[in-house]
Image (tube, grey):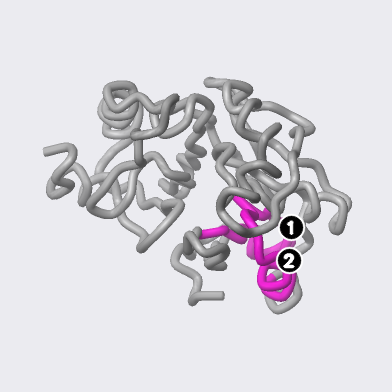
Amino acid sequence: MTTPPAEAPGFKAAIVVVTPFQQNSTLLWDSESMVGAVVDPGGDLDRIEQAIREVGVKVEKILLTHGHIDHAGGADDLRKSLGVPVEGPHPADRFLLDNLAKQGEAYGFPAKPVTPDRWLEEGETVTVGGHTFDVLHCPGHSPGSVVLVNHAQRFILMGDVLFQGSIGRTDFPYGDHEALIGAIKTKLFPLGDDYAFIPGHGPVSSIGAERRSNPFLT
């Protein structure tokens, strides 16, 4: 578990790097109640559960930003272990979640199919420890990728839509580069330069930093 990259009055977040893809699974919790969520538990559940114990988080749900193995491969086992629901992603990623076991065979680490207890649509909200996140559907990297935005703390759970200095891959058969760029420019840029985000891989960043220097967007 890394030093918490996002701390603000109200909630805290910490990254647990998992899977051979070095994916950022995020542990997010309310600083008073200690109620929180696990975001994108792709695998290495022993590390995630150790972080939960170390922090003392009472996990109320699992959130998925999209259906790739490094983000969702451990979700079903963690749901059973913790006895909590899975929310997200958008239903357009159902085919990816249904085929997680096959993805695992291809990439050489275990994964199980998972059906969320709740799919997420554009315009809906999710709550974590009483904090509200707006759901933005941002396809391109995958058809059902969602981004979760907390306006009160100006904070984003980005998934694999946007990274520090890069964007999500779109070289899959179902990828759509134009849709991804369009979502970033029309849905994320208008949020404001001071919105910080945790991406699915790599270091944290902000909308302003990526607007100014991301080579895929400038």
Question: In this picture, which residue range is highlighted in magenta?
Answer: 24-51
Query: In the picture, residue 56 is in which quadrant?
Result: bottom right
Q: Quadrant of the N terminus?
A: bottom right
Q: Look at the numbered disc 2 and give the secondary structure of its residue.
A: loop
Which residue is the site of mark 2?
57
Q: Is 214 placed above or below 181 here?
A: below
Q: Is residue 213 above or below residue 189?
A: below
Along the horizontal axis of the image, is 178 left or right of 93? left
Q: Nearer the viewer, residue 101 or 48?
A: 101
At 87% from the left and 52% from the top, the residue drawn is: 80
Q: Which residue is mark 1?
A: 35
Q: Is residue 40 magenta?
A: yes
Instruction: Inspect the magenta stretch and tell me whether residue 76 lies in it.
Output: no
Tell me what residue is drawn at x 74 percent, y 29 percent: 118
Disc 1 or 2, which lies upstream in sequence? 1
Q: Is residue 15 left or right of residue 63?
A: left
Residue 8 located left or right of residue 45: left
Q: Are marks 1 and 2 in contact (CB under 8 Å)?
A: yes
| Residue type beneath disc 2 | Val
Q: Residues within 10 Å of mark 1 (few under 14, many from 20)?
A: some
